Amino acid sequence: MVDWAKIIRNPDQSTMTVQKSTASTAGPDLDWDDIRYFVELARQDKLSATARVLGVEHSTVARRIGMLEARLGVRLFDRLPKHWVLTAEGETLLAQARRVEDEALAFARAGAGAATLRCTVRLSAPPAFASTFIVPRLGSLRTLWPGIELEIIGEIRQADLYRREADLALRMARPEQAGLAARPLAQTGYGVYAAPGWFERPEREWEFIGYGEAMKDTPQQQWLDKFIAGRTYAFRTNDAIALLAGCRTGLGVAVMPHFLGRGDPGLVLHPEHAQVLSRPLWLAVHPDVRRSPRVTAVAELLAAMLREHAALLA
């Protein structure tokens, strides 16, 4: 069996010998990219999906896998019309490859943790919160993070901090991944909003705007499903900004976070349903980078911003 971790740790070794069925000699040493392409294709099982993740053309993925197979002297994948399926040999090597991947990612995180303030910090945050709450308040705070290039990734899904998809993540639920350092920074309140005139109608005539299938399990959508009690949805979306726009234009009644609805002249907050639920906003970081000066600077910036505007959020 090939000891890939040993190969990675000994880059000066110019050749490696792999026992093939013909007992021939393999080509040049493997490098991290060889293993990275192999692990990602095993994870995605499609060339196109793997190429998107790695940021390359699908032909590059196929070529790199072919080169790896030639070096190892084994066939790692069966090429089916719609999928690439691991062979028995590929399955055997995958566990070792994943361990090497974990070590490489841990090395990258440790390096990021040792970096100076003059670096990039990637923050993953819910799209609507990032665009309507965080970004509009950054201009006046720029002097607090000199030398740092802040990259904000607006996404509904939870970024994988172990795979360094982000350095920090703001999440509307406590992180479930073991080992992450996390703390609640603020409470996000939700109320029932509508365009002017809706609340003058009898409640039995209200129509509603809600989230679609992708967000059906969120606390605010579950509350709304119970509150509707058989009445009609006029519009559904997985986009909070689209929800806000639909509410403004009079499509119906919606449950929205106060940071979106409060103070908006095109919306009215129902006085009897002004605070239907509250959710903690969590900041998560991987322990390997939590002591990085640049990550700490951005984390403290976010904490101060949320403290200052706690009343708007809650």
Image: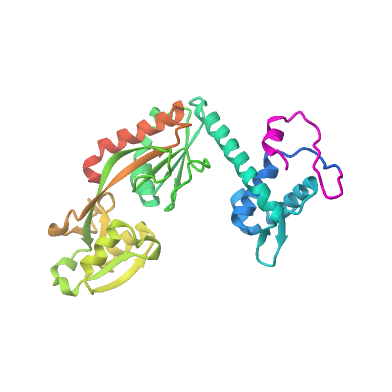
Whether residue 141 appears in this view of the structure is no
Percent position of residue 5, x then y? 67, 36
- Is 247 in front, or is 65? 65
- Residue 178 lies left or right of residue 80; in this view the side is left
- At 13% across and 68% down in the image, what residue appears? 200
Q: Is residue 177 magenta?
A: no
- At 74% across and 39% down in the image, what residue appears? 30
- Is 183 in front, or is 191? 183
Percent position of residue 236, x then y? 35, 67
- Residue 290 lies left or right of residue 234; in this view the side is right
- Residue 115 lies left or right of residue 247; in this view the side is right
**Count of numbered labels shown in the rendering:** 0
Q: Which secondary structure dominates the residues rendered in magenta?
A: loop
- At 62% across and 46% down in the image, what residue appears? 95
Whether residue 110 appears in this view of the structure is yes
Percent position of residue 264, x then y? 24, 53
Please tell me in which quadrant of the rendered image residue 77 appears: bottom right
User: Which stretch appears magenta?
Assistant: 1-24
- At 70% across and 38% down in the image, what residue appears? 3
- Is 241 in front, or is 281? 281
- Is 152 in front, or is 108? 108
Color theme of the render: rainbow
Looking at the rendering, in which quadrant would you find the N terminus? top right
Does residue 145 sit above or below 170 in this rendering? above
Q: Is residue 5 magenta?
A: yes
Does residue 3 sit above or below 113 in this rendering? below
